[in-house]
């Protein structure tokens, strides 16, 4: 998997791993909390025929660097900007899953001129009502999160992931757990996970009103895709997001949990291809 090292400012020396396939208009796929670039492998395969598809390991995740620091949404968005600039990408279509949706909208707010389209899958979006789960609130507590993360095993991770699916697929869950497990479960990986979980909280609390105001001015076409049975992010949140973005359309999936791009891959990939590339496809 390719990697590059960012240069300049407080991102100087930050190493980012990514996957890149295809040629043409660029789409960037942004994973959620605890995710990684290859979790998008089915989406990459479906979209690479229409353009260049990039999926990155956000800082602190996968094989990217895991510095000890606060992992605020603005930090992740600046890392995305650094990656795109290093690759010479001027304009991009963004697809964000779960917390990756929050990173995507943050980037769109910070760099609106560089974003063509925005797709949000099972996404958390600052500025719209969202009550964190009990597990999230417990993991955010100092000390509690450190103890809990140190006790995690592959079996416990698999069991937790299974609860996120409406109809769990054992092969997909096994892949999501096993891929680069050593790096992701290392002391640095656990610290980065907890720092992200805790650092993004301000965006959903103190900064929520500013986000909502900024997103209400977002002109880019947006697509909100969400499972009706999502146990992590309620569909009421997704509907509020779709109603609060000026140029948004919603796609709601039955018998679907938190991973629509996996649980309903054919439907979601079709929606994404039509939304992201229809304007550039030959007729």
Image (cartoon, helix red, strand yellow):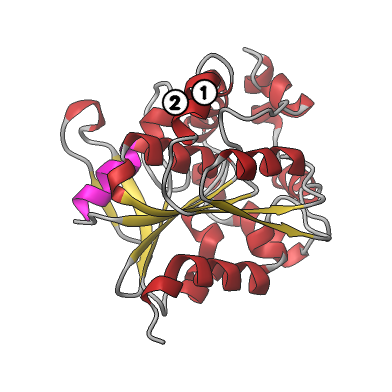
Residue 54 vs residue 167: left or right? left
Residue placed most toward the observer, 173 or 109: 109
Q: Is residue 174 above or below residue 43?
A: above
Q: Quadrant of residue 124?
A: top right
Task: Give the image location of residue 181, x and y in percent.
Answer: 56, 49
Quadrant placement of the N terminus: bottom left
Query: Which part of the image, by quadrant, shows the C terminus?
Result: bottom left
Task: Identify the residue shown where x is 71% and y is 26%.
Answer: 132
- Examine the residues drawn in magenta and state their main secondary structure: helix
**What is the CA distance from the residue labelled 2 to the residue labelled 1?**
8 Å
Q: Are marks 2 and 1 in contact (CB under 8 Å)?
A: yes
Q: Residue at x 35, y 65 (%)?
A: 20
To which residue does mark 1 refer? 203
**Residue 211 image position (x, y, % from top left):** 49, 27
Q: Disc 2 or 1, which lies upstream in sequence?
A: 2
**Foreground of the two, 73 or 18:** 73
Instruction: Give the residue at mark 2.
Output: 72
Dot 2, crowdedness within 10 Å: few (<14), some or many (≥20)? some
**Residue 270 magenta-highlighted:** no
| Residue closest to the far bottom | 283
Residue 166, position as x, y percentages in the image: 83, 56
Query: For this view, does 74 lie left or right of residue 61?
Result: left
The magenta stretch spans which residues? 78-87
Q: Secondary structure at mark 2?
A: loop
Which residue is more in the foreground, 108 or 140? 108
From the viewer's perspective, tell me whether residue 58 is left or right of residue 254. Answer: left
């Amino acid at each position: 998997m390719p990697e590059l090292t960012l240069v300049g400012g407080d991102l100087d020396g930050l190493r980012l791993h990514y996957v890149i396939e295809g040629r043409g208009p660029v789409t960037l796929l942004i994973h959620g909390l605890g995710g990684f670039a290859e979790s998008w492998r089915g989406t990459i395969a479906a979209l690479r025929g229409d353009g260049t598809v990039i999926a990155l390991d956000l800082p602190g995740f996968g094989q990217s660097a895991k510095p000890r620091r606060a992992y605020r949404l603005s930090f992740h968005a600046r890392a995305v900007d650094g990656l795109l600039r290093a690759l010479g990408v001027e304009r991009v279509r963004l697809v964000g899953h779960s917390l990756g949706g929050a990173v995507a909208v943050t980037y769109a707010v910070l760099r609106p001129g560089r974003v063509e389209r925005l797709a949000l899958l099972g996404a958390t979006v600052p500025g719209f009502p969202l009550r964190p789960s009990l597990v999230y609130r417990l993991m955010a507590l100092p000390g509690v999160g450190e103890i809990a993360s140190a006790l995690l095993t592959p079996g416990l991770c698999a069991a937790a992931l299974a609860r996120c699916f409406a109809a769990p697929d054992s092969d997909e869950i096994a892949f999501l757990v096993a891929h680069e497990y050593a790096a992701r479960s290392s002391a640095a990986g656990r610290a980065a996970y907890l720092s992200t979980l805790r650092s993004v909280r301000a965006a959903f609390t103190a900064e929520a009103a500013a986000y909502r105001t900024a997103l209400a001015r977002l002109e880019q076409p947006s697509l909100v895709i969400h499972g009706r049975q999502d146990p992590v992010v309620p569909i009421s949140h997704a509907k509020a997001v779709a109603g609060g973005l000026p140029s948004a359309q919603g796609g709601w999936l039955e018998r679907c949990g938190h991973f629509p791009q996996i649980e309903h891959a054919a439907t979601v990939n079709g929606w994404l291809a039509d939304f992201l590339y229809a304007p550039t496809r030959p007729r």
